[in-house]
Each structure stands twice: as C-alpha cells, then as structure tokens.
Amino acid sequence: MRTTDEQVRKLMEEVGKSRSLEVAAARSGMHRNTAGKYRKLKKLPSELRQPRTWRTRADPFADTWPEIQAMLELAPELEAKSLFEYLMARDVGAHEPGQLRTLQRKIRVWRAQSGPPKTVFFAQVHRPGEAMQTDFTWASCLEVTIGGEAFPHMLCHPVLPYSNWEWATVCQSESLIALRRGLQSALFELGRVPKWHQTDNSTAATHDLRTGKRGFNEDYVRLMEHFDVEPRTIAIGESHQNGDVEALNGALKRRLEQHLLLRGSRDFDTVHEYELWLQDKLTAANRLRQKRLEDELAAMRVLEVRRLPDHVEKRVTVTSWSTIRVLHNTYSVPSRLIGEEVLVRVFDDRLEVEYKGVAQLTVERLTGRHGHRIDYRHFIWSLVQKPGAFERYRYRDELFPSVVFRRSYDELLARLGNRKADVEYLRLLYLAASTMESEVESALQLLLEAGAGVDARSVRELVQPMTEAVVPSLKPAIVDLAVYDALLGPIEVAS
C-alpha cells in the first residue's frame, strides 16, 4: 500500500515526541523500514514523486491521431465518444472498448493546447434591491407525504441575488398561476418591490402559445405592470444567467431535508400545514441574511398595490357530454348543468365550478394537456338508461373507480357476455353512487373472494342503505325535588 503524506506527518509528530522509531511507525501505520526512510529524507511522499515521462503501453491511436486531429480542427465540437465509435466501425478489430478513455484524455489535452477558445463566465456584482430571480424546482426528492399519501410537487422559488433572501410556495406545475402566487407571496413578505424580475424561458412567462413566438405573454406582462416591475428573461440555453436561484434551489432542498430529519416525520395533515412549515424554515434562514437584506430593503420601492387573486376565472359552457374543457383538459360536471354557462376559478391545484353564484363542485386540477378527470356520479343516472353507450364510451376507463370494480366487471363479462355484463355493471355503479362507493367495493371484494357470482342484487343485500332513524320511545324522567331539599338541610327561620 502506498504511503500517504498524512502518515508521514503523523510519523514526524510521534518522532518529535521522542518516541522510538518502532512505536512511531506503529502509530503511523507503516513498516519500521519505511518509517526509517522517511525520517532520514524528511520529505513527504508527494515531494518525492517525479512526473512520469514515459508510456506504460503503446499508444493505440498513434497511427490515426493525425486524421483525428484534422477532424477536430474542422469540427471542434466533435466528441471523443463519437470519434471512437467511428473508428471502431471503420477499422474493425483495431480498437477495444477500454481504449475510449485513452482517446478522451488525448482529445482533452489537444483542446487545452490547440483547441478553440472556450466561453468565459464573468462574475457579476449584484446591486442591492435591483433584481429578483424566480425559478421552479421539483421537490419530490424530499419524499413528503400528505395524510400518508405520496405528494409529488414543485416549489416556486423567488430569490434576491444580492442578499440571497429567498421564499417559496408549493405548486404543481410551472404555470402562470403558480408563478403569480409565488411572486406575490415573496413581495408581500418583503413589503418591497425590486426594479426588475427575471425568469427563465418557461411557458409561464415567455411562451405565447397562441402565436408560437418567444417573448413575454400578455398575462405575464400585466402581472409585471401591476407591480411596476421590469420583466427580464435569460438568454435561450443560458441557464447560468439565473445562476443565483439555480444554486439556491439545491441549497434549499438540502436544508429542508435536514429539517425533515430533525422533525422525525415527512408526513403532514394538509398541504397548507406543509407550506407553513416550509416558510417557517425559510424565515429562520433569512434571519442570517438580515444585514445585507437591510441594504436591499433600503434600495427597493415600498409595495403599495393590492394583492391579485391566486386564480384566474374562465366562463365555459357545459357540453352535452356533461363535461367542460379548461386549459386543454376535460372535466365532468353534474349533468343537470348541460347547456349552461358556468364560472370556473382556476387555481394552481384545483378548479372551483360555480353556477349563478352557487358552488357546484371542486375538482383537482390536471397538469399538462389532453388529460381528463371523469366522475361517474355526474351522469350515471343517464348511462343506466343507455347501457349500449358504455361499450365505446371515450372515457370508459374512468368508470372503474378501483381494481375491485374492474375485476367485478371482468367476472361479469366472463359469465354473462358483453351486453348483460354492461347492464349489470352499470347497476353496480348506480348503487355505488346512490349509497357509498366504499361499501359497494367491500361487498364486491367479499363476493369475489367467496367465488360467488357478482350481481347488483347480491351487493344490495350486503350494503345496508341508510334508512330514516327510528326515535326510541322514552318516558319522561320524574324528578323528586325532596332529594335536593334534604341536601340543603333544615332551614332556620329568623325570628
């Protein structure tokens, strides 16, 4: 085993304590002869090593290097792996896979000695109160759960580069709604407004999906105008220009990971409780940045505008399919609303549907495009009257609330055939909507485990529908007041 500098330093320390060579060598973890050599030389191993000027094996690219160099001069962006694959395919058997590292080292040396100039990153001086950078970062690595259920989520993360003051809100996607909520939360926490706000080229701020052009979209521009902040974005493909917030993304998640370990649990009752915990940890971290933050606050304008709502409103008409389409996704609503115009409040995590000022339903918001969230309870009453529509219903998979329902349908299909199975299964769904889905599911599980045939009649017998409560007949209590008189004792009458 090669002797290290640390071992020799330990040896010299022990020798300086007047230890014998044998004892000093043992405490330093080296042989006595080795210890004697280093005591005599009085040099560290690193000081004795000489750079090797010879090759231990023949250069496998000696013959092809002039050709490789010429190719690199014509196209400096060529990678070693691509060149190696080219040589392997052209000169079959001339090279081995293990020689790739040799070629990579040769090309790295060539780039350093003769390659084109590389991009230089110039350290920037941040001025207090001038800018705020905002970025989104996935936080699923924290493995937070809500009510015991996995909670994949992102954080909207605004940062002041001068002081490294930071804030964060929980969100589900890089949407404008999430950006507006995160930015407002940070600004109202500060009570001040920077000169300009910088983001990357996310769809929340810079992609106008209607025209396909870059540049700030109208909703984002209106948000910036509301706070009188100048919008800025980084150059395309230049993520380092948002380097401060990018670096703090990782630091934030490492800090939260440590606090979760100290907390002893990653489970929270609600998302609101989790966000309050998150912001409490950020408040504590920001106290360490107070001095530079004071410089920032002194240079920033006072926040004087009202807070914008954390949602957008859209008016849509309910289709004859008992659905609405909001932000490229489809949701079912109660069939009684077919043909009516409803008001939809779109939050980052949910939709709230209202008709004529009366709330109709709240549903979890879908992210992305072309998704659908269908609730059979909204239209099962119509579907049982048109069972033939079930076979080719576009969203049929959504009509199986759980694996148990799917297994029940498969059992019906094998026993009754398509038409009868569809009718019987729709009766089961009707029963689930009329009573409680969980009770129907439990009854189906029992029938499947018993090997009995599944049908609506058998399930109905197992599921006890809620009936009108029977008020028991009670006799009125007779109160004997003499008992209380006895407690008071004899009453003396004053003369």
Image (cartoon, helix red, strand yellow):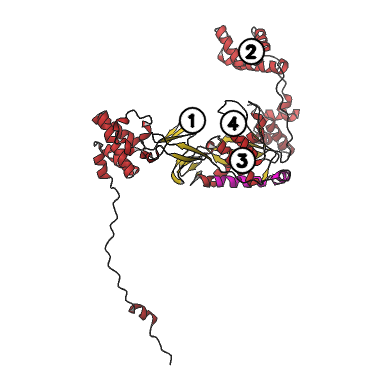
- Name the quadrant containing residue 437: top left
Between discs 3 and 4, the one toward the N terminus = 3
Residue where numbered disc 1 is placed? 369
Left or right: where 404 falls relative to 247: left
Element under disc 1: loop
Q: Earlier in the sequence, mark 2 or mark 3?
A: 2
Q: Residue 223, image x and y in percent?
A: 61, 38
Whichever of callouts 3 and 1 sits on the residue coming sooner in the sequence is: 3
State the CA–CA distance, disc 1 to disc 2. 57 Å
Residue under numbered circle 3: 183
Query: What is the distance, in whole Å, between disc 2 and disc 3 at their CAs?
Result: 60 Å
If you read the primary sequence from the N terminus, does the residue marked by circle 4 or circle 2 appear first?
A: 2
Given residues 262 and 481, the one toward you in this image is: 481
Question: Looking at the image, can residue 253 be seen?
Answer: no
CB-based contact (under 8 Å), mark 2 and mark 3 = no
Looking at the image, is mark 4 or mark 2 nearer the viewer? 4
Numbered tag placed on residue 57 in the rendering:
2
- Between residues 322 and 450, which one lies in front from this camera angle? 322
Majority secondary structure of magenta residues: helix
Q: From which residue to which does the magenta span run?
A: 275-302
Judge the density around disc 3: few (<14), some (14-19), many (≥20) Cα neighbours within 10 Å: many
Identify which amino acid the numbered label 2 is placed on: Arg
Magenta run includes residue 276: yes
Within-10-Å neighbours for mark 2: few <14, some 14–19, many 20+? few
Name the side, left or right, on which 408 lies relative to 238: left
Q: Is residue 380 visible?
A: yes
The residue that label 4 is drawn on is 202
Residues at discs 4 and 2 in contact (Cβ within 8 Å): no
Vertically, is 99 above or below 493?
A: above
For the residues marked 3 and 1, what is the alpha-carbon distance in whole angstroms? 25 Å
Q: Secondary structure at mark 2?
A: loop
